[in-house]
């Protein structure tokens, strides 16, 4: 059976499809505003003409490449290509400014591959069992998980928690606009159909990171642009050192990423944020975070790619999407007659093994293609700033328009670019606002749903074991600084 | 980079042949993110429609605001047959009665092109209650009033409305919990977090076939061809005749020759025997009809739903 699967994968046509989708994924991921989800949606009509294995292979390969490629503009130009990169955009850009852009990208690449392979290994070995566990998560658990994600970001990841909270609240406010809330009630819509549809994350994210950076560079026209980049002759040699040095963060990122990916309600973006925060919390040198330190990038980079593989667990076992990409994949699986369900592992064993092999192949292929992409993308930094900035703005506009094919996206991008510029000039970080937008709707939905089921009794939020555990972790993050302060005070009295 | 671009273009190229009547690629706009049953139907139809029109047909996802964003995009587009809306009938005939103020009026702003399929709602039980039929579930509900919740794929969804009507006509006290999309609530239904869910048959039929969920009743006047062994609520003594349909619409003012052409091609697409089977597998009953019949259904459904929505006390703003 294994040989049959091998024969399916190592068919020249399938290999060609994998290579072409890899290039396609790299391109889509590297253009800000074009996401891995969009890459998948664009591939669907093409897969109609293919056999099941190459059809799925094209999606697996393109998405893995796109998530990694999102790191490239994020690192070099401070334009996260996908929301999953936003968690460590500032860190990677700080490294580029220090001349370590290639190191940051190399680490993003190598640890994306490691995370991806880890997630794949888990998918191959434990999918049915893990999927059962994932179903134990209900609104109570998701509520605490999201709360934990938000608290992690605000209390751990940023130097000034107060300004972080203000930024986060802005994000939550933006997330509440529109009709898509648990009551279906129009909020802040002013009778406008675009506002009724809610404010889309991607254009806002591009505006807040990239446009604010463009405004800043224009306003300081005399500042030096030169960012001399240190050369790394052999990307891998440096990486082996990093792997040995940061083996625990790599493992932690991969495990957490896979676990969050497996949950039907959470995906690569939350995984990256939580991993970045965990990395800082347990680091021996947390003071270096935010100044261009590679440790957080390693952990979060491993995390978001492992989440990608993890999301296939509930998708294959139950036909329940683990993220927005697998939501599309499930449709393709049905069209191709590979109906998801526990029996898929028996009825379509050969096809499933072939798909697993594609996962491994795609992750390995990421190394050579990724290095080529890094080497060529880095040339961007040598372009003169007065040429580069308008081109970046052009890409921002294209990406913001493309997400909903709507000019409203471009307006959003520009407005939030100005808002973010004003925020950062006054010391408010923009990343928590992005996180608030990503998680705001989820937080509200799960809270309302849980409250309905608990009949308004908040104590029920602590009754279930996993929920209680997550609640304790969330409280610990809030009360740890207070407790530590009280403890120090009581010691100094005596 | 250039080589990348060439690959991408080669990859995305679709067969395109010049055609007389519609001279540009057609956008088929839908109001949901990729992955749901509307998206799936749109992609199947687009695949078949493209060679018939000799133009690429691109599915464009414009999610948000209960299809409002998509409707807005289509009604303000050029009325030349190149921008079409594919939607379930819910946002056109049901939702307008639940809001006091509505920015669009389907019969004024859109012109009907074709009806594609009918869809019933299924009442699905997860493992939580242990019940295997409607009477067993009713007994369980009476013994466990604190667990009397049903899930739907969202506030204002057809599943929500069927639940409200069900509670009103059967006298059962059962409360609504809204999820975002069917994937989310299927997860909780399978995991035993909530006892029952109401959604399009398409969203639950695969779980029903594999025995993970059990659809115990359907909402239409007659049994669904996709689930011939499942009784309707009517047969079970609960008066109900609620179903929706998927249709294609163009902006008002589109020339009738183009509407007729598109309607004819769409009816032919849906009528293909292999597609019939594919739709039934998805839990949808093929019900192809041209522009005139679709417009009549739209008008009569709009009038029919008003009292149902009002009696159900179904208000959203």
Image: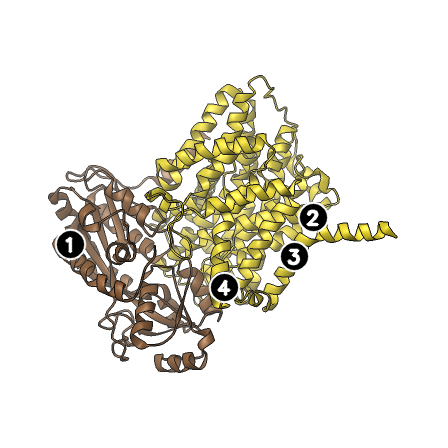
Chain colours: A yellow, B brown
Q: Do the residues bearing badges 3 and 4 touch, measured as CB atoms within 8 Å?
A: no
Answer yes or no: are tags 3 and 1 on the same subunit.
no
Q: In the current view of this chain or complex, which residue is farthest to the right?
A: A494
Secondary structure under tag 4 reads helix
| Above or below for B114 versus A73 | below
Q: Earlier in the sequence, mark 4 or mark 2?
A: 2
Residue A131 shows in the view = yes
Using the numbered discs, state the Cα–Cα distance from disc 1 to disc 2 in whole angstroms: 62 Å
Q: Do the residues bearing badges 2 and 3 touch, measured as CB atoms within 8 Å?
A: no
Q: Which mark is residue A475?
A: 3
Q: Nearer the viewer, residue A246 or A385?
A: A385
Answer yes or no: are tags 3 and 4 on the same subunit.
yes
* Crowd tier of the residue under label 2, counting other residues whose Cα lies within 10 Å: few below 14, some 14–19, many 20 or above: some
Image-based side of B48 in relation to A342, left or right: left
Which residue position is annotated with label 4?
Answer: A451
Tag 3, which chain? A
Using the numbered discs, state the Cα–Cα distance from disc 3 to disc 1 in whole angstroms: 57 Å
Image-based side of B120 in relation to A348, left or right: left
Q: Earlier in the sequence, mark 3 or mark 4?
A: 4
Q: Nearer the viewer, residue A194 or A313?
A: A194
Using the numbered discs, state the Cα–Cα distance from disc 2 to disc 3 in whole angstroms: 15 Å
Say how many tags the image has: 4
> Percent from the top left, x then y, of residue A464?
58, 68
Secondary structure under tag 1 reads helix
Secondary structure under tag 3 reads helix
> Percent from the top left, x then y, of residue A283?
72, 46
Q: Which quadrant of the structure image shows residue A483? A: bottom right
Which residue position is annotated with label 2?
Answer: A281
Q: Residue at x 43, y 28 (%)?
A: A394
């Amino acid at each position: 059976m294994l040989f049959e699967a091998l024969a399916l994968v190592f068919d020249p046509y399938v290999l060609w499809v994998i290579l072409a989708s890899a290039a396609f994924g790299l391109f889509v991921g590297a253009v800000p505003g074009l996401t891995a989800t969009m890459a998948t949606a664009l591939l669907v009509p093409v897969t109609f003409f293919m056999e099941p294995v190459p059809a799925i292979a094209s999606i697996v390969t393109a998405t893995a490449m796109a998530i990694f490629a999102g790191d490239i503009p994020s690192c070099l130009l401070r334009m996260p290509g996908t929301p999953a990169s936003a968690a460590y955009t500032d860190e990677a850009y700080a490294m580029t400014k220090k001349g370590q852009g290639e190191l940051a990208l190399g680490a993003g690449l190598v640890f994306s591959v490691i995370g991806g392979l880890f997630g794949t290994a888990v998918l191959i070995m434990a999918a049915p069992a893990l999927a059962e566990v994932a179903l134990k998560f209900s609104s109570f658990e998701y509520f605490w998980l999201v709360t934990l994600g938000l608290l992690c970001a605000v209390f751990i990841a940023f130097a000034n928690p107060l300004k972080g909270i203000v930024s986060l609240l802005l994000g939550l406010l933006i997330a509440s606009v529109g009709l898509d809330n648990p009551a279906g009630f129009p909020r802040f819509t002013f009778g406008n159909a675009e506002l009724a549809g809610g404010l889309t994350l991607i254009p806002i994210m591009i505006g807040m990171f990239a446009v604010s950076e463009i405004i800043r560079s224009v306003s300081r026209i005399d500042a030096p642009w030169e960012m001399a980049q240190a050369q790394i002759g052999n990307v891998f040699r440096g990486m082996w050192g990093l792997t040995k040095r940061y083996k625990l963060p790599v493992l932690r990122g991969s495990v957490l990423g896979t676990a969050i990916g497996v949950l039907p309600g959470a995906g690569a973006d939350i995984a990256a944020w939580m991993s970045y925060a965990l990395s800082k919390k347990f680091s021996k040198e947390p003071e270096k975070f935010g100044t261009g330190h590679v440790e957080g990038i390693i952990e979060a980079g491993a995390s978001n790619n492992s989440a990608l593989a993890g999301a296939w667990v509930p998708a294959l076992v139950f036909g329940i999407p683990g993220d927005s990409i697998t939501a599309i994949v499930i449709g393709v699986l049905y069209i191709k007659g590979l109906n998801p369900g526990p029996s898929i592992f028996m009825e379509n064993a050969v096809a499933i093994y072939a798909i697993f092999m594609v996962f491994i192949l795609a992750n390995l292929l990421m190394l050579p293609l990724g290095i080529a992409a890094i080497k060529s993308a880095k040339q961007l930094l040598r372009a003169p700033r007065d040429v580069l900035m308008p081109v970046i703005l052009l890409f921002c506009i294209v990406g913001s328009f493309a997400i909903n094919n709507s000019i409203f996206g471009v307006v959003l991008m520009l407005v939030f670019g100005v808002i973010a510029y004003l925020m950062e000039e006054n010391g408010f970080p923009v990343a928590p606002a992005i996180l608030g937008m990503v998680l705001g709707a989820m937080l509200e939905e799960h809270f309302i749903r849980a409250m309905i089921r608990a009949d308004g009794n908040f104590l029920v939020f602590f009754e279930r074991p996993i929920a209680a555990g997550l609640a304790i972790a969330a409280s610990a993050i809030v009360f740890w600084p207070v407790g530590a302060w009280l403890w120090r005070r009581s010691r100094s009295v005596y | 980079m250039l080589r990348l671009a060439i690959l991408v273009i080669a990859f995305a190229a679709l067969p395109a042949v010049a055609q007389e009547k519609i001279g540009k690629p057609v956008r088929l706009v839908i109001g949901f993110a990729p992955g749901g049953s509307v998206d799936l139907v749109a992609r199947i139809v687009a695949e078949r429609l493209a060679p018939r029109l000799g133009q690429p047909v691109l599915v464009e996802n414009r999610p948000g605001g209960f299809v409002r964003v998509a409707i807005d995009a289509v009604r303000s587009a050029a009325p030349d047959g190149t921008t079409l809306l594919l939607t379930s009938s819910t946002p056109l005939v049901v939702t307008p009665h639940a809001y006091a103020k509505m920015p669009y009026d389907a019969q004024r702003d859109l012109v009907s092109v074709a009806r594609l399929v009918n869809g019933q709602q299924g009442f699905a039980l997860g493992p939580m209650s242990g019940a295997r039929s409607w009477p067993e579930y009713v007994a369980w509900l009476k013994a466990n009033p604190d667990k009397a919740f049903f899930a739907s794929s969202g506030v204002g969804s057809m599943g929500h409305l069927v639940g409200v009507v069900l509670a009103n006509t059967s006298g059962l006290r059962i409360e609504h919990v809204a999820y975002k999309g069917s994937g989310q609530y299927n997860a909780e239904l399978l995991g035993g977090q909530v006892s029952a869910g109401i959604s399009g048959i398409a969203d639950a039929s695969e779980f029903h076939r594999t025995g993970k969920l059990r659809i115990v009743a359907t909402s239409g006047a007659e049994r669904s061809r996709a689930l011939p062994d499942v009784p309707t609520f009517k047969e079970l003594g609960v008066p109900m005749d609620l179903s929706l349909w998927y249709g294609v619409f163009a902006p008002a003012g589109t020339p009738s020759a183009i509407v007729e052409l598109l309607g004819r091609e769409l009816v032919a697409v849906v009528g293909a025997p292999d597609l019939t089977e594919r739709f039934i597998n998805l839990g949808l009953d093929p019900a192809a009809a041209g522009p005139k019949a679709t417009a009549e259904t739209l008008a009569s459904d709009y009038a029919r739903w008003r009292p149902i929505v009002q009696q159900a006390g179904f208000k959203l703003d």
